[in-house]
Image: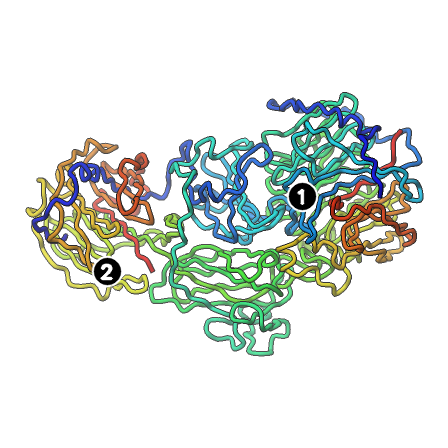
Amino acid sequence: MKPVNKIKTLFGVFTLLLALVLLLSFKGESKAQAAAFLISPYYGNESINQGYHGGHPAYDYSLTYQPVLAAASGTVTRVQWYNNTPECHQSPSNTACGYGLHIYIRHNNNYVSRYAHLSSTAFNLNTTSAPVNDGVVIGTSGHTGWSTGPHLHFEVKDASGGNANPYALNLWKDGQAAGHPLPPLASGTEIIVDDNTTNSAGFSKGRGGIFNNNCPPNTCPYWYHYTGIGYGNDMYATFVNGNVVDYWARWQPSLPSGGGIYEVFVHTPGDHATSWQAPFTVVHADGQTIGRVDQYGLFNRWVTIGVYRMVPGNYVYTTDATGESQGIHCGGGQWCELGADAVKFVRRDTLYQSLWRGNQGWSNSVAIINNLPQWGTGTGWLGTTSLDYLPGSGALQTQTYFVIGNTLWQGMWRGNQGWSRTIPLHNGQIRWGSASSWSGPAPISGLPGSGTLQTQSEFVVCNTLWQALWRGNQGWARTIPIQGGQPVWGSASAWTGPISISGLPGSGNMETQTEFAVGNTLWQAFWRGGQGWTRTVPINNCNLNWNGASAWTGPVSINGLPGSGSMQTQEDFVIKP
Amino acid sequence: MHTNNRIIVRMFSLLLLLIISCTPNSVEPPVTDLSEVSFSSEQSGTSSKSLIRYATIELEENGNAHFHEPAHFSHFELAVDAQTNIIEAVSITLSPELDFIPDHVVPSPDGGYLVLMQPVVPGGRPHVFNQKTGEVQALFETYAGGRFFGWHPDARHFLFWIDMVGLWLVDAETGNKLKLAEPAGPVQGAAISPDGQTIAYITNDLPDTVGALWFVDSAGKDARVQFDAGDISYLYSHAWSPDGMQLLYYGNCSAGSGGKNIQVGGPLCVFDTLSQSSQSLELPFVGYEPVWSPNGRYIAGTGLATKTEACQKTIILSESDSCLYNGRSIYLVDMVTGETQELTEGIAPVWSPDGSSLAFLSHRTGVPEVWTISIDGSNLKQLTTDGLAKSPYGQLAWVQEVE
């Protein structure tokens, strides 16, 4: 809870009244599938190079080896090459080559989205049942199969397998199918592990089975070393070996304590890498996942094989067991080559979530890719934290976080007394151990309204800190300018309100509210009566476009959350690397 | 080569009169039980001439093609005698009312129908032209494109597959469809047996078996797995030997040997349905459909000369079709002696109806052209000379003229 000082009204009352329709929506793990179910990580009309018509019941987006994201939650039911014959790696004229390397996702309404001509996948070949959430990275676009140039072929089939025009049927739930350009990929801190001749700096290779027989220079006869090619001007290559693991290579990054969420990229050189389906296994904090890379179709490119939570000790490895034998894919009785070059680990923005139920705390972290939370890639709810670690006494009423620069601001209320502190951020890591002391308590009498404090929330948009609170089912809001990385409390606007809870969906008392801003979108959620609601609000040039807010989605049952008891508080905030 | 640009007579004449009203098939015709239909593969009235059919595309100087520009496509037919001398060369003019240019035109064995394949991702949409009525019927209009897997020997039905919709036997006369199977995975090729009774196809409908080769009868019954053709496998549409006893496939030749996914030779294999075992062919296969000779003694295919690099990646990515011919040759496997010989440079061979010659595509003059050669390596002939303006591509067809 931040000190409440006398403030000036900085914004029109009308604006703030609209702002009071902030709903904290806890982002539940499942979303109801309505008629509109697709989201738009794609890519705007200006990026379409062939639209939907009778001879082409799909959209072609002019992507050039860029990440491909799932358009809606569902189950991955297909990861395969459309045609295995050697002549069908890529052809502009041979229609038999079809989709090339492709992925199908079956959604909860039994529609199927198809992603074709890929160059890498974040799932193993022949995957038939893998859950995936919308916006998650599923692979990299490419130029495989029947393709005249690099692009993403995006197709939707209805529940009967018939053609469906996603735009015409208005299946895009965020209404942004048209004119919604792909946001620039947020840059994150990168760790590149490159091959080397000394089995050092995180790279190692060997033979005779997985991680057997590390080979220092010149002791692995069939790891061929090539210079003048590849990332760092060298690479290794070996011949594929069907389904038998013999030769291997491993890339282990030096990750900071606590790890983080990383997108993993693999580099393919321009030669000596001709496997159509090189396997790269990511050993991450939540298990192992195999991605596949079409090395034959890549020339000095990085491609993604997915986003993972990784902690120190995690790594990526490949083996010569690509599934390809002599004469398969590469033709002419020859063996394809598996290239081992460099692997890159890119730290991604992380959405942190915390909640309290029954005086026990839980936390979750979720990657953000292309300004979309990658629901399902998170740690999963981790808990529990006891209330004993927090200052004050009494039941926890609310907790709040917001980030300004390299500082995480944390506040909480319990027993109608407020406390706050700051925690430094470093390279995307929260330095809990370096947190300031809690300051407080601040009395609730400094807040507008009456009754018990039900919830307080804060979020930052550009240079403005927004605050909202609910007491006695009445809402209040104000803004505080940010200068020099600090809220200027003395210049805070007056509290605007009260707003009645009757304007919100659902029923029951307000329990908690949360927001977070990612890119040009403010995500809002609230819980009342044990049910959660969410919506998004566009941000235009640092202004919140309340009129353009999406409809409220919900309700989501609290049963999907960990713990037991009533919802006390939930808060989300984004940490950039 | 002088080409007769008149609108041709014979079986293609009615193409000029194509009724491209293209009655939409918005309602699926009823499924037909074909179990009581007798199939006949007899042909009558053959002449001494045979016909080589091919499609062409206009190429740029650098070898790039305008595949999205219909005006640059053409279809041709060469009538040749027994010595592969050209008797007549005809440009097939499709009616301008046809609102697409087919990338494949596949006549039925007796010429009574044409399947015109409209390119629709991921494959094509079939339009059936009935020579007797002059009508064109579009099929599977509400679905993604599929794959044409060959005519039934009865010259009336054909095999067609659409991913996630099914593998069908389609009646060209009525448009009725019989679903033979509905595989969950992509069908890696399918082929109808010479007697029309059995359809073979590869898919991954079994747990832990990605490349299962299945048989199903022409009534869509008695589906049964034959063997594991390998995780990476394919069945071309002319896979059956003429006597129907063997299957040619691309994949793992350990089939029938109990060696699950233990690669034995390959990647071209011949499965014997009697002994239930496979043998590996010593043909350095590099793609394009391998084909049985009409008498079943030989298999012709496209191979890559030893130690020849298939293609530089830079070329693949920028001008992929320019790499189609590099180091490729026509190979002949004698199934009696086991001998394999390299005949001549080229790709995608097809047999003459009498089995004495092969037609193929070659780039030896600097541009793709149609060539023929006798199976003893003699009588090498260049049949087309249109160069970049009309560059042959795709699979040729060589059929006996039916009078």
Q: How many marks?
A: 2
Query: Residue B189: x and y, percent?
Result: 69, 43
Drawn side of residue B16 relative to residue B185, left or right = right
Label 1 sits on a secondary structure element that is helix
Amino acid, disc 1: Ala
Residue B196 lies, with reference to residue B255, above or below; the image says above
Report the residue marked by disc 1. Answer: A96
Quarter occupied by residue A205: bottom right
Location of the C terminus of chain A by quadrant is bottom left
Chain containing mark 1: A
Q: Residues within 10 Å of mark 1 (few under 14, many from 20)?
A: many
Residue closer to the observer: B332 or A495: A495
Amino acid, disc 2: Thr
Report the residue marked by disc 2. Answer: A407
Identified at 74% across, 42% down, the residue is B56
Query: Residue B106: x and y, percent?
Result: 76, 35
Drawn side of residue A296 relative to residue A415, left or right = right
Label 2 sits on a secondary structure element that is strand
Estimate the spatial distance between the alpha carbons at disc 2 and disc 1, rounded to whole Å.
Answer: 56 Å
Residue closer to the observer: B271 or A464: A464
Residue A507 lies, with reference to residue B377, above or below; the image says above
Tell me which label, 2 or 1, sits earlier in the chain. 1
User: Same chain for marks 2 and 1?
Assistant: yes
Q: Which mark is residue A430?
A: none
Drawn side of residue A315 relative to residue A504, left or right = right
Chain containing mark 2: A
Identified at 43% across, 38% down, the residue is A178
Query: Residue A116: x and y, percent?
Result: 56, 45
Residue closer to the observer: A66 or B383: B383
